[in-house]
Image (cartoon, rainbow, N blue to C red):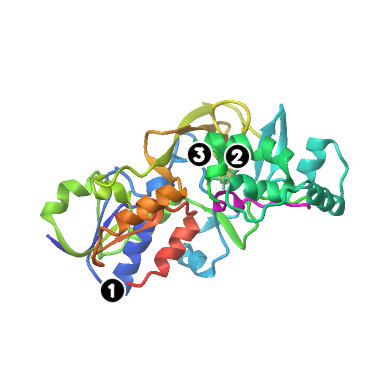
Amino acid sequence: MYFDYVIVGAGIAGAVMARRLAEEKDASILIVDKNSFVGGFCFDYRNQDGIIIHKYGPHIFRTDNEKVWSFLSRFTDWYDYQHKVKIYIGGKLYPMPINLDTVNSFLNENFTAETLSQYFERQKKKYDEITNVKEVVESQIGTLFYDNFFKNYTQKQWGVAPEELPPEIVSRIPIRSNRDDRYFTVKYQGIPVNGYTEMIKKILDHTNIKIMLNTEFEEIKSQITYSKLYYSGSIDEFYNFKLGKLPYRCVKFKFERYEKEWYQSAGVINYPNDYEYTRITEFKHFLPHYTHATVIAKEYPSWNGDSSYPIPTGQNRDLYHKYQALSKDDSIAFIGRLGEYQYYSMDQIVDKILNMSL
Ligand code: UDP
C-alpha cells in the first residue's frame, strides 16, 4: 500500500504534522501508533465521575505564540485556567515559583518588593558563566533557597545531580519579588474544554488522514511504501539502539480517588524534600467539574516504563547527533520531544512543526 507520507506516533507532534500535510500538500497520510488511543503523552480520559484525568501527568497549555494558539483553537475551545503550584517544605505550603509571599513566609520576614530584591542581591552567588541548574538558581537567589526548593526536587526528578543538568531545565521557572502566584505568565493559557484527546482527534479528522492504532511501525513497514517518513518516537529505537541507548527519564503515576470535594488547595503540590513522589496533581482544578469525588495522581520518578523526558546532558546530546547523522537523505525526519531529544513543552512542539518546511 502506498502513502505519500507516513507518520509514526499520534501525539501532538504527529497530529499537527499530519494536518499540515493533509491541508497544504493535499497528500495521502498514514499515521500509526502502538497505543490504542491518539494523543501520545497528552492522552486524557473521563473517569466514572466525569473528571478528565491526564494519564501522563499534568498538561497545562500555555503559549505566547499567536500562530500556535490560533492553529490549536481551530480544534478546541479553551477553559481559562491559570495554573497555580504550591510547594511543601517542613510541613508548610508555599507559593511556587518563589515570590514575595514565599520568602516572607519561609523566612518569617516582612520584605517589600524592593527590600526583597535587595535581599536577593545580597544572597546571590557570582558565577562567571552559568553552565548548570545549580548555578542558574544560586546566581539569582543564593544557596538557602536553592537547597530547600530546587536541589532535592531536581535530583529526585531527574536522577542526576543538578550540577550535571543544563540551565534551560530550570530557567523556565521565574523568581518574583511581587505577589503574583501564577505558575506561567504568558499571553494564552488554558485547558481544552473536552480534553487533549478530543482536540487531537479533531486535528486528525481529515479525509486524507488514515489512522492505524495498536500498531507497531516495525510490524507494518514491509507492507507499505511512502515518499517520506516523520518519526516521533525515540531515534535510538528507530535505529535498533545500534550506537547505544539514549537515556530517558520515565514517570510512574499512582492514581487515587476520594469521595470528597477537594484533596488539596492547588492543581499541583511539589514535594522536594519529603516522600518518594515529586508532586501530587489534583485534576479537578483544571476544568469545572460538578461532582463530590476527586482524583489525584502521585508522580514517581522511574527508570523504566514509557520514555517521557529526554535527559539533555552534553554527552546524551552528542549521542543524539550521532544517531541523527545516520539518516543521509531527507526521506526521514525526526519530530517531537522524543524524536528531537528535546525537553519541549507542548507549544514549542506545535511551533516547531508549524514552521518546518514541507
Ligand atoms: N524545579 C524544582 N523545584 C520545583 C519546581 C521545579 O527544582 O518545585 C526544577 C526541576 O529541576 C524541574 C524544573 O525546575 O525539572 C522544571 O520544572 P517544571 O515544573 O517546569 O517541570 P515539568 O512540569 O516539565 O516536569
Residue drawn at x 50%, y 39% as measured from the top left? 158
Please report contact status of discs 2 and 1: CB closer than 8 Å, yes or no: no
- Left or right of 164, for residue 123: right
Amino acid under disc 3? Trp
Q: In the image, what residue occupies the spot 63% across and 40% down? A: 150
The alpha-carbon separation of the residues under discs 3 and 2 comes to 18 Å
Q: Is residue 338 above or below residue 29?
A: above
Residue 179 in the image: state x and y as whole percent.
Answer: 77, 50
Residue 290 seen in this snapshot: no
Question: Which mark is first along the chain, 1 or 3?
Answer: 1
Three-letter code, disc 1: Lys
Quadrant position of the N terminus in the picture: bottom left
The circle on residue 268 is 2
Q: Point out the stretch of residues depicted in magenta.
A: 167-178
Viewed as shown, does residue 197 lie left or right of 129? left
Element carrying mark 3: helix
Task: Find disc 3 in the rendering and name its residue.
Answer: 158
Q: What residue is pinned by disc 1?
A: 25
Q: Is mark 2 within 8 Å of ligand 1?
A: yes
